[in-house]
């Protein structure tokens, strides 16, 4: 008799990381300008996901915030190594980094660039991903198998201001 189990969903929120050693776990995240790195050791079939908001290091020397890319990536790598993963086996998928804000900040692009450079500098194998653009993403990572699913989140329609009401001094008043 084959027993089918529902996957256990673990939500990875901003500034968090989660690991899994269980075949049925699925790590999920909603991403806009943030980046999530999905990392696993395919031999041990363990993996994890982080979710960072800002590139580089925290400018505050006192903080150990995983909201920043450097800290978040280091914590994910070290957590996997503590579980017995081999650094040379680690494979990575990168998602997010969209420039979803309509202002001039390009925080998504900066996050994507940081994550890509980190993986390259550390010599990890980049297996895939989807970075950049203007749309957010929903993603699901299955650390045991290495499968990643993602879909785009439609952007909100442009909101136009309500037209200016007629000048009350003109005597024109519109009734509903």
Image (spheres, helix red, strand yellow):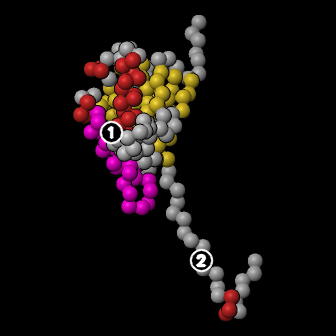
Side (left or right) of 77 relative to 163: left
Q: Does the magenta stretch include residue 110?
A: yes
- Can you give x and y, in whole percent of width and height, for residue 171 in the image? 71, 92
Q: What element carries label 2?
A: loop
Image quadrant of residue 167?
A: bottom right
Q: Tell me which numbered mark, 1 or 2, is placed earlier along the sequence.
A: 1
- Can you give x and y, in whole percent of width and height, for residue 21 in the image? 47, 17
Task: Report how far apart the C-alphas of labels 1 and 2 lie in the structure.
Answer: 43 Å
10 Å crowding of disc 1: few (<14), some (14-19), many (20+): many
In the rendered image, the residue lying farthest to the bottom is: 170
Q: What residue is shown with label 1?
A: 115
In front of the other: 57 or 69: 57
Position of the N terminus by quadrant = top right
**Residue drawn 45% across the image and 47% down it:** 32
Position of the C terminus by quadrant = bottom right
Magenta region, residue range: 96-119
Residue 132 against residue 146 in the figure, above or below: below
**Residue drawn 36% across the image and 26% down it:** 77
Q: What residue is shown with label 2?
A: 163
Residue 76 against residue 97 in the figure, above or below: above
Image quadrant of residue 103?
A: bottom left
**Residue drawn 44% across the image and 50% down it:** 135
- Can you give x and y, in whole percent of width and height, for residue 169 in the image? 68, 92
Q: What element carries label 1?
A: helix
1 or 2: mark nearer the eye: 1
In front of the other: 143 or 117: 117
The answer to whether residue 113 of the structure is visible from this angle is yes
In the rendered image, the residue lying farthest to the right is: 176
Q: Are marks 1 and 2 in contact (CB under 8 Å)?
A: no
């Amino acid at each position: 008799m084959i027993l089918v189990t529902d996957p256990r969903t673990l939500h990875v929120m901003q500034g968090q990381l989660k690991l899994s050693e269980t075949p049925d776990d699925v790590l999920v995240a909603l991403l806009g300008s943030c980046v999530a790195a999905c990392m696993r050791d395919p031999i041990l079939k363990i993996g994890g996901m982080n979710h960072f908001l800002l590139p580089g290091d925290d400018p505050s020397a006192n903080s150990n915030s995983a909201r920043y890319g450097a800290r978040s990536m280091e914590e994910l790598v070290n957590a996997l190594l503590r579980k017995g993963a081999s650094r040379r086996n680690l494979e990575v998928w990168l998602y997010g980094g969209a420039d979803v804000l309509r202002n001039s900040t390009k925080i998504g692009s900066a996050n994507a660039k940081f994550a890509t450079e980190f993986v390259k500098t550390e010599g990890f194998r980049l297996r895939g991903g989807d970075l950049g653009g203007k749309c957010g993403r929903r993603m699901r990572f299955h650390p045991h198998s290495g499968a990643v699913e993602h879909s785009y989140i439609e952007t909100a329609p442009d909101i136009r201001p309500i037209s200016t009401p007629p000048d009350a001094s003109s005597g024109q008043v519109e009734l509903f």
